[in-house]
Image (cartoon, grey):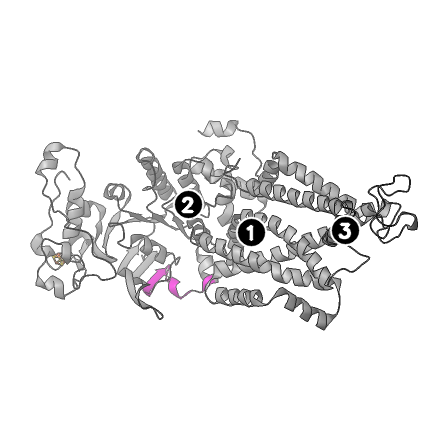
Amino acid sequence: MSPLLQVRDLKVHFPVRTGGIVVGKYAPLKAVDGVSFDLAAGETLGIVGESGCGKSTLGRAVLQLLPATAGSVAWLGTELTALDKDEMRARRRDLQIVFQDPLASLDPRMTAGDIIAEPLRNFHPALSSSERKARVQKMMGEVGLLPGMVNRYPHEFSGGQCQRIGIARAMILRPKLIVCDEPVSALDVSIRAQVINLLMELQRAHGLSMLFISHDLAVVRHISHRVMVLYLGRVMELAPQDLLYAKPLHPYTQALLTAVPVPDPVRERAKPRTVLLGDPPSPLNPPSGCVFRTRCPHATSVCTDVVPPLETAEGGHTVACHHWRKIGGYVMPGS
Amino acid sequence: MSDMAVALPEIEGRSLWQDAWRRLRANRAAVASLVILAVIAIASIVGPELLTWKYDQIDWDHVEAAPPNFAAGHYLGTDSIGRDLLARVLFGGRVSLMVGVLATAVALLIGVTVGTVAGYIGGRTDQLLMRLVDLLYSVPLTFFVIILMVTFGRNFILMFLAIGAVEWLTMARIVRGQTLTLRTREFIEAARAAGGSTPAIILRHIVPNVLGMVIVYVTLTIPQVILLESFLSFLGLGIQEPMTSWGMLINDGAAELEVTPRTLIVPAIFMTVTLFCFNFLGDGLRDALDPKDR
Ligand code: SF4
């Protein structure tokens, strides 16, 4: 079965002014630099990384909300980057997004009902207003909003409710793919689980494919089938969720995972640590060879000179590191 | 949760406009202003037809600014050459309000269209439109007016053209600035992701969000236009004696301030009240259009 979404060597570079008085000097900021992955129907791919690693940019570039500099995004075999504006607009029926900041992503001058109905207006303009209303009400029920809330404005809702409105808007067309861009990181910890469970329920009920972008490893583990680790716009490791969390191969993933506290003081203390040294380097001027080498405890001279290719390990595990065999998958305690 | 949903009655959808109207009605100053404006407008439209004296009719028995005389039908007296002051003020109101409202409406339409399109689409379109605005800005109004007069001769319509051509420029700039900041907001990106076309996004999201700002500017523009009209009439473009407008009446009245202050005060009161009402109404509308402000 061919995958729903096929991304190959996707690059998104932004020109950033670095100097020059009259004629500006520009350097490319490589937010996403050669990312490839496939997504099957009904699958959730988690995308993790520190802030600024390009994960949000990647999500937007897949949906063509940002123009890709190079590479290909194929949706059901159609190359999205080659479509013109109107053709792309027609595809948006299947490709939706849930944003990070629930309030900012809702028009302050529209009622909840109008916001949720907007995709219907775009794609089913012939729908009568009562049919539209009925579908909005049904959708609101599905995401756990009361019908009496249709006339309220976004600022009258809590963050969690706003995100439910955002999810309802994304879901009302019954899309095939939803990109969730940090959908819970702006929410209270107490309601994160509800929103995550809602997303998982909807995904199961409708066989959705999902790109779930987050910096929170625990959340990603809960929701994803496969997980991709990004660093400075490049893929470090891509593996099925259970494998990645149990036996991370890449030094960066290992460092990320050991930073997550284990809820058991004995095991927590016994846990080996790979400490991340310093801050990630500027994406304007990424290190040569392996982009992670400035913070990697295993770096050698080959890491400086050669970009590590993505190599395949067992069980659909892929990793971009020269020394992954030597470092060895290290088994996470307690998993 | 689901049985709660069933228990609730059928809910009517409301639009921003219905909500705005409901909120506007709750604002006393705005409602009072609306009523006063309506009264002045109706009086200006039908008043001159009902009065005994016409605006250009000279009453030879009451020349030289006679004081109010109810028996003769001069409720506010006459002006320096014996024309009924009330008839003139009401007729002037017709002209002033028409110019104020129509010219502002034209400026609003062009300004908002150009501003939102330039701001939202950006790039070349923006550059082109804004250079056009700069260009028109740099043409002095008097010069522009003289050119219009020379090419088309004296004409009432030209006044609208001249005023419209000047007033939409600032509007376009303001709207463009607002649109530029709106464009980067996430809900606009969300609208694009939801499959909205450019015109749909401009109409559904950009325009309602710049409207509050625009309405305040409109209430500032109407007085400006009314004053501009008297200036243009003074230059000989626009209306001519015996036709009149508030601006012209005030001009004439000011010349006779020491002899008969009444001829200045009466049109001045009409104009001031009108302008005040527009301001209050504008404030009220801005608040009414902002759902966060209940
Ligand atoms: S390639 Fe070298 S620097 Fe990069 S992660 Fe592997 S060991 Fe570290």
Q: Decide if ligand 1 comes within 8 Å of the CB at mark 1.
A: no
Q: Amino acid at mark 2?
A: Ala
The image position of residue A244, as x and y in percent, is: 19, 48
Helix, strand or loop at disc 3? Answer: loop
According to the picture, the residue beneath numbered tag 1 turns out to be: A125
According to the picture, the residue beneath numbered tag 2 turns out to be: A104
**Label 3 neighbour load within 10 Å: few <14, some 14-19, many 20+:** some
According to the picture, the residue beneath numbered tag 3 turns out to be: B256
Q: Which mark is residue A177?
A: none
Q: CA distance from mark 3 to mark 1?
A: 64 Å
Q: Does A76 lie within the magenta span?
A: yes
Q: CA distance from mark 2 to mark 3?
A: 59 Å
Q: Are marks 2 and 3 on the same chain?
A: no
Q: Residue at x 51, y 61 (%)?
A: B118
Q: Does A238 lie within the magenta span?
A: no
> Left or right of A317: which side holds A27?
right
Q: Decide if ligand 1 comes within 8 Å of the CB at mark 2.
A: no
Q: Which chain does the residue under circle 2 lie in?
A: A
Badge nearest the viewer, 3 or 1: 3
Q: Which chain does the residue under circle 3 lie in?
A: B
- Cβ atoms at labels 1 and 2 below 8 Å apart: no
Ligand 1, seen in the image, is in the quarter at bottom left
